[in-house]
Amino acid sequence: MKSRITLFAITALLPFALLIIGFELLPLLAMVRDSFLADDGITFTFMQYKLALTNPYYTRGMSNSLIISVYSSLIGMVIALCASYSITRMPKKIQSGLITFSNLTSNFSGVPLAFAFIILLGNSGLFTLLFKDWGWDLAKSFELYSWSGLVAVYVYFQVPLAILLLYPAYSGIHKNWRESSALLGASSLQFWLRIGLPVITPSIVGTFSILLANAMGAYATAYALVGGSYNLLPIRIGSLVAGDVATRPQLGSALAVILGLMMIAAMWLNERMMRRFRRDLQ
C-alpha cells in the first residue's frame, strides 16, 4: 500500500518536474554553454567573460544595476518597516484589506507600471502639469527618465513586496514583552533597540536580499521607461540577445551568468548574516 502511494506521488509530480526541466533547467544549461562559445557559436573560449568583466561599458552597467538596486531596496525597507508596523496596530479587518492591497500592488510592475508613471509624472504627466499650474515646476527638480526616476519606480514595486515579507515578522514580538519592559522602566526606544529590532533583524536581512535580487533582475520596467539611454545590466543583456541592429547572444549569456552569480552572492551573504543573527539571539 505504501509503495502504491509513493508511486502515485511520483506520477503526480512528474508533469511539474518536466515543466521545471523544460522551462528552467534546460534554458539555464544552454545559457551557461553559450557563454563559453565564441561569436561563431562553435569555438570554446573564455573571451566573452573577459570582455564582460573588462569592458567599461558592461562593468558600468553592472555597477549601475547594483547601485540602483541597493538604493531602492534601502528606501523600500525603511518605508515598509514603518508601514508594516502601522498595519499591525490597526483592526484585523483593515489589516486583511491592506495586506490584500499590498499583494495586488506588488504584482503591478513591468510595462504597465512604467506607463502609469509616464502618465502621472512624465514631461506632460498629470501631476507634472498640475504642479506647474500651481507654480511648482516639477521638471526642474525631478526627471522621470533619469536615475532618480528609475529609483522612484523601483521603490514603488519594492515597498508592497517588503510589506508582505515584513508584516509576519512583527507577530514574533509578543505584547507581553512590551508590557514587561515597561514595568521594568524601559522606554519605547529602549524596547525597540534591545528587544524589537534584534528579534526582527533576520527578517529584515532576508527581506533586503530578496528586494536586492528583485531589483537587479528587473528589465521590463526599466526598458519601458528609459529604453537604452541608461546603462543597466538587464537592458544590456536584452540588447545583446534581441537587439534591433546586431545581436551577440554568447556575450549576452555571459552577462546573464554574471548577473545570476551576483544574485547568488547576495543570497549567500544574506544566509550567512541570518545564521549569525539567529546564533546571537540564542
Image (cartoon, grey):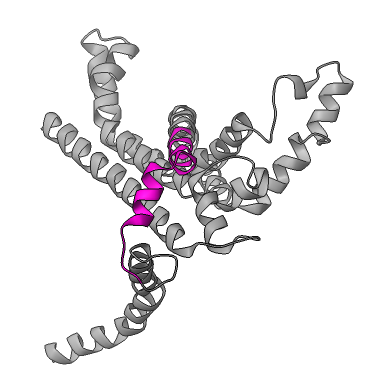
In this view of the protein, can residue 66 be seen by the observer?
A: yes
Left/right of residue 73 with respect to residue 271 in the rendered view: right
Range of residues picked out in magenta: 43-67
* Among the 4 quarters of the image, the one containing residue 53: top left
* Among the 4 quarters of the image, the one containing residue 97: top right
Query: Is residue 62 one of those drawn in magenta?
Result: yes
Q: Position of residue 204 (x, y in %)?
A: 33, 34
- Image point (43%, 33%), residue name: 70
Residue nearest the viewer, comparing 133 with 178: 133
Q: Position of residue 11 (x, y in %)?
A: 28, 88
Residue nearest the viewer, comparing 177 with 278: 278
Q: Position of residue 123 (x, y in %)?
A: 80, 34
- Image point (21%, 38%), residue name: 274
Q: Main secondary structure of the magenta part?
A: helix
Q: Farthest right residue?
A: 133
Q: Above or below — where is 201 with respect to 18?
A: above
Q: Above or below — where is 223 with respect to 171?
A: below
Q: Position of residue 267 (x, y in %)?
A: 29, 45
Count the marks: 0
Instruction: Locate the C terminus and report the quarter of the image it occupies.
Output: top left
Left/right of residue 279 with respect to residue 232 in the rendered view: left
